[in-house]
């Protein structure tokens, strides 16, 4: 078991990447704190883990709120004694997120509040907990869009993921000598609810697929495997990276027919 005796907190654990990662981490021996605003589905993740013999609990927290983030970390420490892995993964991509002219200020603020401030709060309250544990691993979910511009705009989302990448890098340097590693996970386009709601017609899906050398969307399970590597001691010399798991999209100039 690759995460035996570790406690992991995962935000956005009710769905997609967060849910698959919670299930995988528990299977690898971690005690998992599932955090989300969707309580019904968060509890489903926990039930699934328990049915498979794993250990998990659910905490409701809106990651854009400081008090909620302070509480989720406190619950993790109180319930399981220590926190070793912090996966700041919750994020939104709003339907009304467009270009600079069309995007409303409220959509910008909402996106930044969850996608960027949520990661900041996770780290603000989580880093002291990792220090108590003698070190640990932080994984922040950014995106391939932090590397590439798109003609189908989602400006607030793209800017938010650029910010996640930049802050992850800096935190990695700041905490490198405290045995705290900080890495960004940069998924490519995935077949999860978040993207499929945005690419809601076959034509929009095909337009995105044209750019992916592998010719398919990624799966949340494939991101969970990458997060497992970053969470485990197998990545003990890895910090400050922008781990791209993207079917080759950022490497491509022209994709094969
Ligand atoms: P998803 O929509 O399936 O899951 C996101 C989860 O975050 C949901 O359970 C949702 O309830 C939760 N959430 C939303 N706002 C929250 C808040 N304020 N507080 C707490 N939880 C909240 O999406 P996913 O595809 O699994 O996305 C996970 C992460 O991966 C996001 O940060 C997303 O931006 C990123 N990402 C996704 C893709 C993709 O193609 N799906 C690509 C690159 C990056």
Image (cartoon, rainbow, N blue to C red):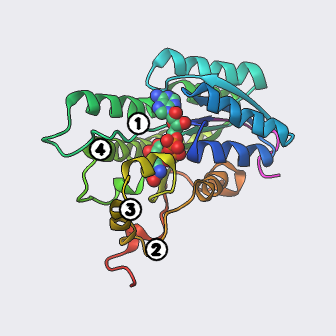
Q: Are the two marked residues, 2 and 3, in contact with CB atoms closer than 8 angstroms?
A: no
Looking at marks 1 and 4 on the same chain, the residue that comes earlier in the sequence is marked by: 1
Looking at marks 2 and 4 on the same chain, the residue that comes earlier in the sequence is marked by: 4
| Residue 159 image offset from top left, x and y in percent | 29, 44
User: Does any atom of ligand 1 lie closer than 8 Å to the CB of label 1?
Assistant: yes
| 143 left or right of 219 in image | left
Residue annotated with mark 2: 215
Q: CA distance from mark 1 to mark 3?
A: 27 Å
Looking at the rendered image, the disc whose residue lies closer to the viewer, 2 or 3, is: 3
Residue annotated with mark 1: 115
Looking at the rendered image, the disc whose residue lies closer to the viewer, 1 or 3, is: 3
Q: Is residue 146 above or below residue 61?
A: below
Task: Say which element carries label 4.
Answer: helix
Q: CA distance from mark 1 to mark 2?
A: 28 Å
Residue 50 part of the magenta segment? no
Q: Quadrant of the C terminus?
A: bottom left
The residue drawn where x is 27% and y is 33% is 108
Looking at marks 1 and 2 on the same chain, the residue that comes earlier in the sequence is marked by: 1
Q: CA distance from mark 1 to mark 4?
A: 10 Å
Looking at marks 3 and 4 on the same chain, the residue that comes earlier in the sequence is marked by: 4
Of all residues, the one furthest to the bottom in this rendering is 257
Residue annotated with mark 4: 159
Region of the chain picked out in magenta, as a range: 1-9
User: Between 233 and 117, which is closer to the camera in this rendering?
Assistant: 117
Looking at marks 1 and 3 on the same chain, the residue that comes earlier in the sequence is marked by: 1
């Amino acid at each position: 078991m690759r995460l035996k005796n570790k406690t992991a907190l995962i935000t956005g654990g009710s769905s997609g990447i967060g849910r698959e990662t919670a299930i995988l981490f528990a299977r690898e021996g971690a005690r998992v704190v599932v955090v989300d605003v969707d309580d019904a589905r968060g509890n489903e993740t926990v039930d699934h883990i328990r049915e498979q013999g794993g250990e998990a609990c659910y905490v409701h927290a809106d990651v854009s709120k400081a008090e909620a983030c302070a509480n989720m970390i406190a619950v993790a420490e109180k319930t399981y004694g220590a926190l070793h892995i912090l996966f700041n993964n919750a994020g939104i991509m709003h339907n009304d997120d467009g270009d600079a002219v069309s995007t409303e200020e409220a959509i910008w603020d909402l996106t930044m509040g969850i996608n960027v401030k949520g990661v900041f709060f996770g780290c603000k309250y989580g880093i002291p907990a990792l220090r108590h544990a003698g070190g640990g691993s932080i994984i922040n979910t950014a995106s391939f869009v932090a590397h590439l511009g798109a003609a189908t705009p989602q400006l607030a989302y793209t800017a938010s993921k650029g910010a996640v990448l930049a802050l992850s890098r800096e935190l990695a340097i700041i905490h490198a000598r405290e045995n705290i590693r900080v890495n960004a996970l940069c998924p490519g386009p995935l077949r999860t609810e978040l993207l499929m709601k945005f690419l809601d017609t076959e034509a929009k899906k095909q337009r995105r697929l044209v750019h992916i050398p592998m010719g398919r969307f990624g799966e949340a399970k494939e991101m969970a495997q990458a997060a497992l590597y970053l969470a485990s001691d197998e990545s003990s010399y890895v910090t400050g990276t922008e781990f791209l798991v993207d079917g080759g999209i950022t490497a491509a100039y022209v994709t094969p027919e």
